[in-house]
Amino acid sequence: MERRTFLKNLGLGIAATAVSGGSVANELTTSKNITMENFNTHEFPALPYAYNALEPYIDARTMELHYDKHHRTYFNNFTAAIKGTPLENSTIEEIFAKISSAGDAVRNNGGGFYNHVIFWKNLSAKSNGPSQELSAALAKEFGSFDKFREAFGNSAKTRFGSGWAWLYLTSDKKLAIGSTPNQDNTLMNVSQIKGTPLLALDVWEHAYYLKYQNRRPEYIDAFWNVVNWEEVSRRYKEALK
């Protein structure tokens, strides 16, 4: 689970090589990766892989626009919205816990900033299965890993309009699946589903439309090829503490 600390020395540290033929080259250097342990509301995190690292499942152009335009804009608007207010020195958990009184700019942009940090860490070019501990928990809660995938996929496919699908851990340490609209998440006091986020899937059209157009189910099916189960398993283990 997130520790309530700020790091002052993270820095962005991104260097992308030249664009050729509308695609981004392979090399992308990063600073320290943002994790749930060192999430900082005042730092825009480095993307932990190249824009084209997840192809063919997520294309480089979508990744570039999604990260450097959409995500960066959420971050800039969020930090502007909290600047000079008591929220400026609050942790992200504290902000989300009272988001109902924080205003739409903080809610929408804070959620957009945070949710994408989780999403990027959820993805990896090397997708292995969940840990033995998480596998057992998924089978216990949903019947099998395949049934979990089906339930999570259905949650993402049936989210009307823009939003997110989540695997999360409830306050009584049970795995659950659900979705939230727009940029809401399971940490917000306005959310109908609440708990610690473990796995997130962005189903806003900007996450998939260049490659998949209106074929959201195809994008969701492709997502399973790039899930960073090592990270999801780590979050699960940490959230159980």
Image: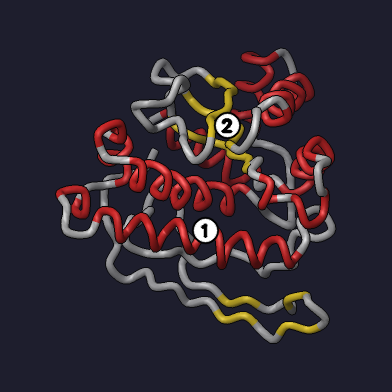
Quarter location, residue 3: top left
Q: Is residue 202 left or right of residue 182?
A: right
In this figure, which residue is indicated by the disc labeled 2? 166
Rendered location of residue 116, percent (x, y): 53, 50
Between the residue at mark 2 and the residue at mark 1, the CA separation in whole angstroms equals 18 Å
In this figure, which residue is indicated by the disc labeled 1? 71
**In front: mark 2 or mark 1?**
1
Residue 160 circle label: none
Quarter location, residue 100: top left
Choose between 16 and 130: the one closer to the eye.
Answer: 16
Rendered location of residue 111, percent (x, y): 43, 44
Q: Compared with residue 130, is residue 116 higher up or lower down, i.e. above or below?
A: below
Q: Is residue 151 left or right of residue 13?
A: right
Mark 2 in CB contact with mark 1 (< 8 angstroms):
no
Q: Earlier in the sequence, mark 2 or mark 1?
A: 1
Spot the residue most to the bottom.
18
